[in-house]
Amino acid sequence: MNRTEIHWMNGADSLPKQMVFIEALPGVGNVGKIIADALIEEHESECLAWLMHPDFPPHSTMKDGLLHPPRIEIHQVVLPMGLPVIVLTGDSQPLTPTGQYELADKILKMLDQADAELLLILVGLQADVEEQSIHLVCSDIDTRDAFAERGVIASTTAPEAGMIGMAGLLAGMAPLRSVPAACAVAETLGSTVDVIAGQRLASWVEEKLGIALEISIDTTESTAERIRREIALDQTELDSLLNPSEPSPEFYV
């Protein structure tokens, strides 16, 4: 039995149909989370739901003067020109493999029911200082071919060591739920919050995928400062809990 709980907010009782979904959680450099949080903070947004799981870190956090439980939030964000997207983000992810499987499966079932146009997963990949590439990674042939028709070629080799955590599960399991999914992967030094890599990834999404995020440098920098203060577990502790055997540095979450 899946232990994930959905708590609908603001009168919502389901996800909007045929939308682009953008997902990012804390990970290497927090590259994707910078973008997700900046989208919510800079543009018109409304929280549709919380996703909760008993394997989240037992750490409630303060927001707007109130204490909230560990969760993933689902927001509808209105981008410039009136384009709505759905953003999924949070301050942590389940600390057990079982919890991550359950949460990923619940999210994918919800996106399947919503007939999602695309699940775009924003993540970081630890690399040397001179490496600044962005990789598009797909998990099904149809999605890969659809991007190729638009002139965006998906990587077939990177990341060589694969992907762990929620990002890897969401992308890898998406074809099983008929959800078109792709990962946009930014190489990063892996610092706590890599603002430069986050800005580089946002620009790539705008240029290559045609999604007008339009988040300012000031917003990403202020978001980064807040993330440094609020993330429930630091990356070192999270990595040790998820990967006690110290996997390859090319693994990321």
Image (tube, rainbow, N blue to C red):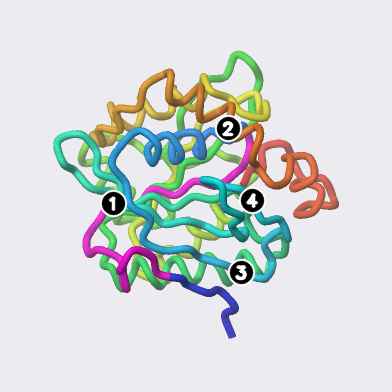
Q: Which residues are magenta?
A: 8-28
**Whole-Å distance between the Cαs marked 2 and 1?**
26 Å
Type of amino acid at the residue the image marks with label 2 = Arg
Quarter of the image where one finds residue 140: bottom left
Q: Earlier in the sequence, mark 1 or mark 4?
A: 1
Per the rendering, the mark at residue 20 is: 1
Let me know if residue 18 is in the magenta part.
yes
Residue 75 image position (x, y, % from top left): 37, 53
Q: Residues within 10 Å of mark 3 (few under 14, many from 20)?
A: many
Residue wearing tag 3: 53
Residue 145 image position (x, y, % from top left): 28, 48
Residue wearing tag 2: 226
**Whole-Å distance between the Cαs marked 1 and 4?**
28 Å
Let me know if residue 175 is in the magenta part.
no
Report the front residue among 67 and 152: 67
Report the front residue among 143 and 6: 6
